[in-house]
Amino acid sequence: MGRGGAAADQRRRILEATAELIAGQGYQETTMEQIVRRARVGYKTFYKHFPDREAAFLALLDAATAHTVERVEGAYEREEGPWPDRVGAALGALFEDVAAHPAAARCVLVEATAAGNEAAAKHEAALKRLAKLLRPGRELNPRREKLPQTLEETLSGGVVWVLGQRLMAGEAAKLRALLPETLEFLLRPYVGEEEAAREAGETAEAISA
Amino acid sequence: MSAEELGPLPAGRHGYSREQVAHHQRERLIAGLAAAVAEKGYAATTLSDIVRHAKVSRRVFYANFERKEECFLAAFEVVAEHLRELVAAAAGEAERWPAQTIAALRAALAFLAAEPDLARLCLLESRAAGPAATVRFAEAVAEAAPPLARGRAERPTGARLPASTEDSTLGSLVSLAQRKVAVGEAERLEDLLPDCVELVLLPYLGPAEAARLAREAA
């Protein structure tokens, strides 16, 4: 491993340790000492990468959000079917990513909201990216712009809440089973109850297949 | 009511008069914490801030609480209990489930809008006050799930609603209210009533009826 590779590896270890500690015990309770010990680096190395604990946490949020948003938006773009299918693909990618990286996900979805304004803003920005994918659903509803203006962000908030609750309960592995109902919840206000239930049913079949 | 006056909440349950309770040290500490948190946020609030606002000594603090977090949890409980009673009383005025639900939403939003500092304490600061407060907040939200789930009896299709419907619906409400408070618009929480009504009633009553009742509630 070259010098650049070693530095990248240290940075990755610091971010992983930060994610695991903060996911486990919260931001306020996590100290720099715990982070360097868990990352198996010295203080000097830590300071080479980040000025303080908050900077490491913010970098983690950026990395985790970028990774997840890329997956989710990628799945949405790649799906060529009608809008409900695209939302289904995006939500499926989100759930998969959260289940694969529960500590980082918990940091973005739960802990970021309690770690100062900058971290909360990153949480908010991630939520808005999700909300943006829902907006085209209005075209499928006769009420369109008469639907509540807060609808997209509110629905995204509901999904984030449910994911956060499951992560806090340590149920990341059981998220897949929750996918069809969450999709139904997201689609219902746009495409109506029957269509939303039908899409959820198809997703449930695809999961068990 | 300011956070300073929070002490004697709620008046009925313990049977003390307002004045008797106001002198109660524990209640004063709770009110002191609420005032300090309103002033500078939970993270920056120190023990000195709490006892200064409560006008009691540190010794009195330690006689009642082990640390700041425990005092916060006690304050959260007082506000949650008050909100619980307000909501139950409002819902009790209505006969049928839709009207009960709308009355409950209206009462909760009205209280939080009238008490922006307490809205902030419950909705935002509880996330900064440690793991126990985060859990307690989620539990308090989940208390609303059973009365909401009674809406499943409103239509035959209610039985088919996914198990997580109440969970996601309540999460949406919380998220909506939290954002309003976070941007400093807690006083305008009641503006959200029509959107909340529509969102909450939709799974149980269907889109047309939910939209109609939302317009009516505006």
Image (tube, helix red, strand yellow):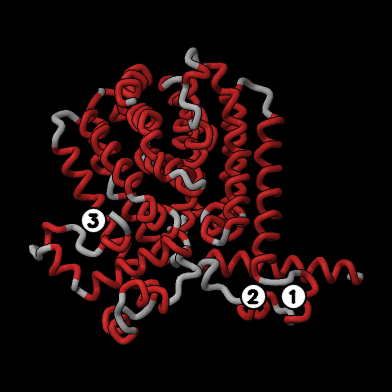
Q: Are marks 3 and 2 on the same chain?
A: no
Q: Which residue has dot 3 on it?
A: B81
Seen in the image, is B175 located left or right of residue A103? left
Quarter of the image for residue A89 reads top right
Q: In the rendered structure, find residue B57 and report the number of the disc placed on it.
A: none
Subunit ID for the residue under disc 2 = A
Q: Which residue has dot 1 on it?
A: A46
User: Who's the residue at 65% across and 70% down the image?
Assistant: A53
How far apart are labels 1 and 3 at the CA level? 45 Å
> 10 Å neighbourhood of mark 3: few (<14), some, or many (≥20)?
some
Residue A129, image x, y percentages: 63, 39
Q: Which residue has dot 2 on it?
A: A35
Looking at the picture, does residue B188 appear above or below residue A136? below
Labels 3 and 2 touching (C-beta < 8 A): no
Foreground mark, 1 or 3, reads 3
User: Who's the residue at 45% across and 71% down the image?
Assistant: B45
Looking at the picture, does residue B46 appear above or below residue A111? below
Seen in the image, is B64 located left or right of residue A66? left
Labels 1 and 3 touching (C-beta < 8 A): no
Subunit ID for the residue under disc 3 = B
